[in-house]
Amino acid sequence: MATRIHIFDTTLRDGEQSPGASLNVEEKLEIARQLERLGVDVIEAGFPVSSPGDFQAVQAISRLIKNCTVCGLTRAVPKDIDVAAEALKPAVRPRIHTGLGVSDSHLQHKLKMSREQAMERGVAAVKHARKYVEDVEYFLEDSGRADRDYLCRVMEAVIKAGATVINIPDTTGYTTPEEYGALIRYVREHVPNADKATISVHCHDDLGMAVANSLAGVLNGARQVECTMNGIGERAGNTSLEEVVMAMRTRRDVYDCETGIVTQELYKTSRMVSASTGILVQPNKAIVGANAFAHSSGIHQDGVLKERTTYEIIDPRDVGILESKIILTARSGRAALKHRLGELGYEYNEAMIDKIYVRFLEVADLKKEVYDEDLEILAADETSAVHQTYELLQVQVSCGERVIPTATVRVRDAQGRELIDSCHGTGPVDAVYRAINRIVNVENSLIEFNIQAVTQGIDALADVTIRIQRGNDIYTGRGANTDIVVASARAYMHALNKLIDRVTPSAADRETAGAV
Amino acid sequence: MATRIHIFDTTLRDGEQSPGASLNVEEKLEIARQLERLGVDVIEAGFPVSSPGDFQAVQAISRLIKNCTVCGLTRAVPKDIDVAAEALKPAVRPRIHTGLGVSDSHLQHKLKMSREQAMERGVAAVKHARKYVEDVEYFLEDSGRADRDYLCRVMEAVIKAGATVINIPDTTGYTTPEEYGALIRYVREHVPNADKATISVHCHDDLGMAVANSLAGVLNGARQVECTMNGIGERAGNTSLEEVVMAMRTRRDVYDCETGIVTQELYKTSRMVSASTGILVQPNKAIVGANAFAHSSGIHQDGVLKERTTYEIIDPRDVGILESKIILTARSGRAALKHRLGELGYEYNEAMIDKIYVRFLEVADLKKEVYDEDLEILAADETSAVHQTYELLQVQVSCGERVIPTATVRVRDAQGRELIDSCHGTGPVDAVYRAINRIVNVENSLIEFNIQAVTQGIDALADVTIRIQRGNDIYTGRGANTDIVVASARAYMHALNKLIDRVTPSAADRETAGAV
């Protein structure tokens, strides 16, 4: 019988640590709901002590999710664990994830502790966490570069103290599959009580080997894989959930294991995470990239027509990429919209459906045919809404080659006053941004600007993602409209409102914790 | 002493097979020049028999490149080999790359030959190629699924016939590192004359393991790695050059090998390939992604400040990511522009420099400060220029929220007539495209639309990439301007001119060959 591997998704924690990817509570709830539908075993929902927003998100996800373990990250200190336990209280299956560095590099440079001190701290943290929950995971940060005997001693001690899962991360993405597999085998063979806990792999992709390293861990006895959708995360990101899951499924003959993942939900989840975080998936990304199942060269097309398996090892339908699409029109009612959004993974209350329906009708009026991708963007756009200190009422632009781009904007401020101003710029978006700046007047710099057409056709809905920076903080704004200039204006207003609200505390204000 | 591994770059052949990535001869020459600077050992320049464009590109690259082997792909048929030999004639070190499927799936479904017939065909092809060149590489397509004894017999026979390099591709990206390593070891141990040829690995990333598979091959005796910049290529793409090279370098203690790659050129090469092909690199891409060296979480920033190696295993400077940037202004002369373009890898004749200088001044006038990224985009934009059946003279747009987006365009046709038309649309780009369509009137559908701001700041130069489709053919257009509407108009005109010119013959017209 195939071994059951647990999938521990950390999109909402490690993935959200990607620069500028910060999500609000609504967006996190939506992704958590989709992860439950996808069938992950554990959702790491956040790092509760790090900010009020993270606390609220972990708490809200704990209330919402019934079929997955909900996990919160902590440092190995009592305060973190108390706060995490509080956030996780409503969860059906709560898990506290705590831990500490084990490599000498981490102990000396970061923690400034002796090996013994660090071990005592870890044991105390596990015991403290076990007062609140049955399920405690312990991370041995930077295991890849740690002294093996010390690693084994810490592991034995924290399992004895009550840890149920041991996470052996390759924090810097430095190891090779042979090394990482050998490390997992080593701890299994040298820690006397290793069989009392589940061993978990957590790999980073700095050398492009996160998937292979994770699978090497599985081949050597790991039973939990930590990963993120689209492989997002710090630096080059984490192990990609869709890749590691599909590799185990496609090569079940080699790995002889199975997961609880409903693979048909993979594509939808990938799109939702990309839309919410604003982190694009490159076309040549395995499993979920736009080209992953595209065959361009004559020979491959020919081969595929003759026999699918000649070049295709995965059926696109198995990951939820469907040929046939349901198209809504201006004649579609609210019920039809709600139903289709539900099928796409977006479940909303009536008030939210009302809001989206208004936007839907605007788009349907212009575009005639509204595709799933359009709906996804409208939904993501509404979910990402923040408290609007300034509301954009009107935008008017003239531009072109041999025209001085000029914009006029009308904005309503918190006091209900309508303010109008205009400005010229190097292009229509620059002109709009300058006109908004004349009204809002908050210093910031634009560090990224992306527009994607979400559907085919020149009348497509444009999805604009921008990132602005002020000091050390980065704010992401998104806007969708059939007019790219209006979409850009909305995205900028969205990011500015986030900045004004300081929805995310600055990186400097955040508590720092063991980043696995 | 560390073993020397040869890097075989197939960005211009397998990479260019990515949907819509097709490059013109000028763009290929520019990339080839940069690959030579990067220090690759072999440049696979194209598939000469497949189209006149491919033939010209291979021939031009053969003339240009002095320090790398230049390679052309062929099927195992005399005509292909004759044509490739002709294209490669000017090369200092020419190589012909020929071969045939070896798996029963390929033999039965695609080739419809017996094993013996296929082997005879392969031997004859190698002998024929050796009449023209000393260096012949033979690919054993779909080796991963082939019968091992047959695989070895073919390999022995083609080495005996004169093959100098044996390419053992994992065509479908199906194998695991253990399997692929074992396959390489198996052929080395079971083919009596294996030591007479270099064994080459060629992996695809469908399960996210191309890098790990390639390295498993190296550990088991392969001495050439086939790869592409940014890992582009058919479906999920090929082994990423930058990842496999940096893994070998960073883990030299494990792999004990070295390459001739000048790693400081990696970032520049990645940007050039992305700009030319229009294939974006995702932020969480290892080595060359925008976030590859970014640390967002408080903990990581803290750790990195305390000791760089805590979280960073590669120094960004080693891959050519520099902090300091040289900024040109409207006061910079032609010489300064030429010099800086040269440092960025773009070497142009005076006529081209003149053209770029005109565009540079326009941008410098608007933006004040012109960054390296702006120059790269202007350069790529000019290099990608095609024969202009229609020339865009003027664009004028008004748009906004509660405005009906309306565009007027003025275009010059091949007869020198100036044509003006206007149209409204769902947004400014839609309006421009509809206005152009009223003049040009060529049926097509837009299948992708991307805008990126190339530099920081709201006055940034926008880089628009679009793909349009007509029948089975896809045409990519690019346009750069500080005005995104003008950039979009240029991109559309560019793609339309390509379509009208039929620069790329349709996939159906192309010869089909062994796609490795």
Image (cartoon, coloured by chain):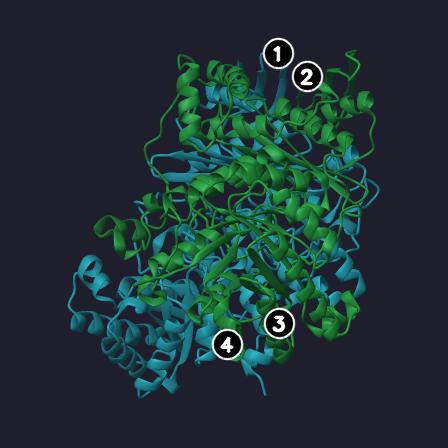
Chain colours: A cyan, B green
- Sequence-first tag of 2 and 4: 4
In this picture, residue A322 sits left or right of residue B133 = right
What is the distance, in whole Å, between disc 3 and disc 4 at their CAs? 21 Å
Mark toward the viewer: 3 or 1? 3
Q: Are marks 2 and 1 in contact (CB under 8 Å)?
A: yes
Q: Quadrant of the C terminus of chain A?
A: bottom left
Residue at x 58% of width, y 35% of height: B27
Chain of the residue under the numbered disc 2 shown in the image: B
Q: Which residue is mark 1?
A: A403
Residue B408 in the image, given as x and y percentages of width and height: 73, 16
Q: From the viewer's side, name the closer residue of A146 and B403.
A: A146
Query: Which type of secondary structure does the marked residue at label 1 adopt?
Result: loop
Q: Is residue B5 visible?
A: yes
Q: Nearer the viewer, mark 2 or mark 4?
A: 4
Point out the residue furthest to the front here.
Answer: B131
The residue type indicated by label 1 comes to Val
